Image: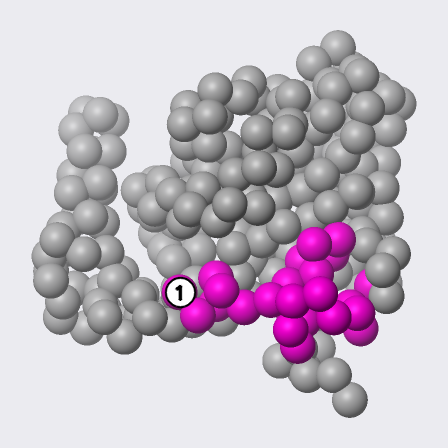
Amino acid sequence: MALLQLARDVIDFCYPGFCAACKASSDPRETLCGSCATKLAELEAAAACPQCAMPLAQAGSPCPFCKGKGVHHYESVLRLGVFEDPLKDLIHFLKYQRRWAAGDFLAERLLAKPEIRALIRSADVLVPVPLHPFRHFTRGYNQAAVVARFLSKKLGKPIARPLKRVRNTESQTNLRSRQKRVENLKDAFELRSAKPVRDKRVLVIDDVMTTGATLQSVARALKPAEPAALDALVIAVADPKHRDFEVV
């Protein structure tokens, strides 16, 4: 029955007769309508800092967010786009409507970006950010693991699960300040096995990055395992202060 339901979800997502983002009537052979497909392509093409994934005015310009420092513990962070529609809709479709096929679609879009493909190829192992067991049970799956499995299959990279989430923290979307997000995730992860990541170049995979608090909490938990290097890949970056990434 589970396989049958999954097959139905794939068919419904890939051939719904309506846009998976805005729900407008569209070609059943396409995931998005023409308007949303264009918007998604624009989000994907927008310049971003290769160290912290935040938007840039133009490629190669100085980053006003991390000022060249990146996200602490990580050599680089790459993303598909900014957390705006239709990317935001697709992520919600994956996380809250039990549509695994949306994860495959987003993973395909990640692989279509040469810099992301190169980052995955440089990794020794992929580590999806784990959910707390209770949240995993209620949701039915880990959205980061769905994306990681697709990337693993396509590029032949192993997946490791060296961490467990030991605190069922409040959703980060409910917290606006960076300090509250950091406190919320303090000691949220625990190292359960160092061997899969020791001396390995690790690529941490998550769905949305806002302040980077989750990635840093993951990095602190991984540190005792002594990985050779850490990079991160997220589907989207969001701004908790709703500044729309404008630099003033």
Judged left or right of residue 134, residue 25 is left
Say which quarter of the image contains residue 16. bottom left
Classify the position of the C terminus by image quarter. Answer: bottom right
Q: Which residues are magenta?
A: 41-66
Residue type marked 1: Ala
The x and y percentages for residue 196 are: 70, 14
Decide: is 77 above or below 225: below
- At x 62% / y 80%, what residue is drawn? 244
The x and y percentages for residue 103 are: 39, 43
**Of residues 7 and 74, the one drawn nearer to the viewer in this rendering:** 74
- At x 57% / y 37%, what residue is drawn? 118
The x and y percentages for residue 174 are: 65, 65
Question: Callout 1 environment at 10 Å: few (<14), some (14 to 19), or many (20+)?
Answer: some
- Residue under label 1: 41
- At x 52% / y 39%, what residue is drawn? 117
Say which quarter of the image contains residue 47. bottom right
The x and y percentages for residue 239 are: 66, 71
